[in-house]
Image (cartoon, grey):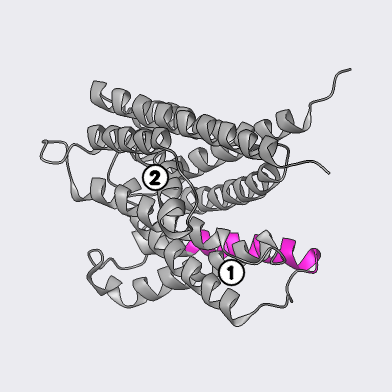
Amino acid sequence: MNTLSINQRGAVLMMVAMSAFAIGDGLMKSLSGGVPLFEAIFLRGVLTSILLFSVVWYRGLLRIKTTAEDKRRILVRCLAEALAAYFFIAALFHMPLGDLTAILQALPLTVTLASAVFLGQTVGWRRWFAILVGFGGVLLIVRPGADSFTIYSVYGVATVICATVRDIVTRSLSPNIPSLTVTLATALAVTLFAGLMGWTNSFGLSPPEPWVIPNGAEIATIIATGVTIILAYLTIIMAMRQGDVSFIAPFRYTGLVVAILVGIIAFGDWPDFLTWIGSGIVVGSGLFAFARERRAEGIAARSVPHR
């Protein structure tokens, strides 16, 4: 019986992670209209934090040595993730899941852009071109000025910006800091943020909504959401530690396919023609950028003299 190679295992794990994220997002969207925005984020965060804490405690990762600089970076990462969670869930409650997920596919391009600007990484003109084309695809999905344009389309773009800050800060963390510990800190920060915003009537971020006692179906949905998010977190960490990242990373676009299917089946949201075109452009640009990065890494490796 043939076994999967390291790269194949990584690809499967990445597809599982992205599918879990998309299904979890669909479950969260189903809560809109029944559970207030910040209450939904808070309740999901409580469950996620408890599950993550159990895993981190079991693996003995609660106490780690960190520098003051790493603590500041983790704090910035937590804030960026909390804002990303707010913008994302707010947009998710008010726009089609497939459209929002398509906007988020620009994240690899924005991370490449930010890496060049803030981390000094070399980006060739072809990847710069791919980034510009990808942003053009996002504009086709968002369509400023069109009848379908709403503030929640801007929230989708704001999610990408906050997630880019999160990922860039993550890249600057010391290698000795476990990914699970950082994930737990982030989950706790998002939970506290949502609880604070709900308690203070959101500081004007969204209309004040009194919290409610979820019914049985809503409680089951929140639990299912927490489980899928944990599955997504664990499998994406496992995926990124398997084989060649440049081979595995493009499989993250599985999430877009699953999100569109969930949107169609669960909510009857069919993407329109321009959204299909914009999604294809964003995905194509991302795949091209990945391919160029892989080629650049191969050339750099061959240029290193062997001893």
Give the quadrant of the N terminus.
Answer: top right
Q: CA distance from mark 2 to mark 1?
A: 25 Å
Q: Amino acid at mark 2?
A: Lys
Residue furthest bottom in the image: 68
Residue 222 location, x and y as percent? 51, 53
Count neighbours of disc 1 (C-alpha within 10 A) and say few if under 14, some if 14 to 19, many if 20 or more.
some
Mark 2 or mark 1, earlier in chain: 2
**Which residue bears the numbered disc 1?**
185
Does the magenta run of residues contain 41? no
**Which residue bears the numbered disc 2?**
29
Dot 2 falls on a residue whose secondary structure is helix
Give the quadrant of the C terminus.
Answer: top right
Count neighbours of disc 2 (C-alpha within 10 A) and say few if under 14, some if 14 to 19, many if 20 or more.
many
Q: Mark 1 and mark 2 in contact (Cβ < 8 Å)?
A: no
Dot 1 falls on a residue whose secondary structure is helix
| Foreground tag (2 vs 1) | 1
Q: Please state which of residues 298 and 214 is positioned toward the viewer in this rendering.
A: 298
Q: For the point 67% across and 38% down, which residue is it?
A: 303
Does the magenta run of residues contain 47? yes
Q: For the point 54% across and 65% down, which residue is it?
A: 186
Q: Which residues are magenta?
A: 43-60
In the picture provided, is 253 more to the left or to the right than 298?
left
Residue 201 location, x and y as percent? 28, 73
Magenta-colored segment: predominant secondary structure:
helix
Q: Amino acid at mark 1?
A: Ala
Residue 278 location, x and y as percent? 30, 28
Occupied quadrant, residue 268: top left
**In this rendering, does residue 291 appear at all?**
yes
Question: Is 88 located above or below residue 193 in the figure?
Answer: above
Q: For the point 46% across and 27% down, which residue is it?
A: 257
